[in-house]
Amino acid sequence: MSADGVRNPEDFCYRHPDRRSYVLCQRCLRTICPECQTQGAVGVICPECMKAQRAETPRPVRRARAAARAMSDRPLVTYWIVGITVALFVLDYIPGLDLTTAFVFNSVFLDPASGFPFQPWRVFTPLVVHAGIWHVGLNMLAVWMIGRSLEPLLGHVRFVVLYVLSGLAGSAAVALLAPGTFVVGASGAVFGLLGAILVIGRHIGANITGILIIVGINLIMGFLPGFSISWQAHVGGLVAGALAGLIFARTRHADQRGLQYGLLAGLAVVLLALCAVPALVG
């Protein structure tokens, strides 16, 4: 539905008018539902365009492209994130290595006058270190479960951008709302993935009730006594993820690619500026 409640035919599959979708065929730019989508070299292709492409392409080339599409459909970034994070968690047990101390975030590392070394890259490094086996286990389970469906929808690069921006937003929120607090973990990034799913799911008319319940429960847990949870990072990641999801949903057309990149870059600049606020006002 459009903003005024009037049905917009462009938001429905051209072959199945009762199915809402916001995905376009990369060749003819017609809206297609998941059933009508075939992964192409870039984006997805409708059945008619796929048939025409096969007629134009020699058989050996078709086989090579099919193999490439099968590889691109896999949530490879999700697997890499989980693998690297778990590997670093294991390596942290090597005596003398102490990756947690090297990667933990605190706003004091952004303030040259604090007496701590100025290490601005720490706004990103908490994503890959965790406080314990339950911490890393639950976060990586969430990344794996969400990434398997979200990464193929967004694509590898957009998924990485979403994950990193959400983690950055978690650091920014901690710097603003809990300056001087040491934090580790990918929880902000996980909430960012959830925020993006909420917005994109709402945009395509999916049932997001279950996701809302999960987000609500986890947000409440951050305020309960006895849990060492940074609710600030959760909220920051959730908001940034929702904003990134909105950008993805509103700039899905090929001719809006430049606008999408610009908006995402602008969001990154704003988040970096927010990280610097405590040092500037302190």
Image (cartoon, grey):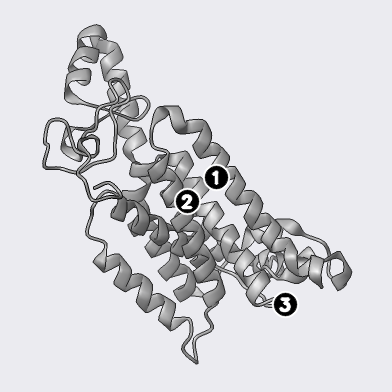
Quadrant assignment, res 196: bottom left
Vertical placement of 16 versus 134: above or below? above
Q: Is residue 163 left or right of residue 214?
A: right
Give the x, y percent position of residue 216.
Answer: 36, 75
Number of residues whose C-alpha sits closer than 10 Å to that of mark 1, classed few (under 14), some (14–19) or many (20 or more)? some
Of circles 2 and 3, the one toward us is: 2
* Residue 276 seen in render: yes
Q: Please name the residue that numbered disc 1 is placed on.
A: 264
Q: Please name the residue that numbered disc 3 is placed on.
A: 180
Name which of mark 1 and mark 2 comes first in the sequence.
2
Quick one: which residue is furthest to the front in this view?
A: 4
Q: Quadrant of the C terminus?
A: bottom right
Name which of mark 2 and mark 3 comes first in the sequence.
3
Q: Label 1 to label 2, Cα distance in Å?
A: 7 Å
In front of the other: 132 or 189: 189
Number of residues whose C-alpha sits closer than 10 Å to that of mark 3, classed few (under 14), some (14–19) or many (20 or more)? some
Q: Are marks 1 and 2 in contact (CB under 8 Å)?
A: yes
In front of the other: 159 or 66: 159
Determine which of the numbered discs, if any, sits on residue 32 in the image: none
Give the x, y percent position of residue 145.
Answer: 33, 58
Vertical placement of 54 versus 226: above or below? above
Q: Residue at x 43, y 62 (%)?
A: 140
Instruction: Report helix, strand or loop for mark 2.
Output: helix
Question: Identity of the amino acid at label 3?
Answer: Gly
Q: Label 2 to label 3, Cα distance in Å?
A: 27 Å
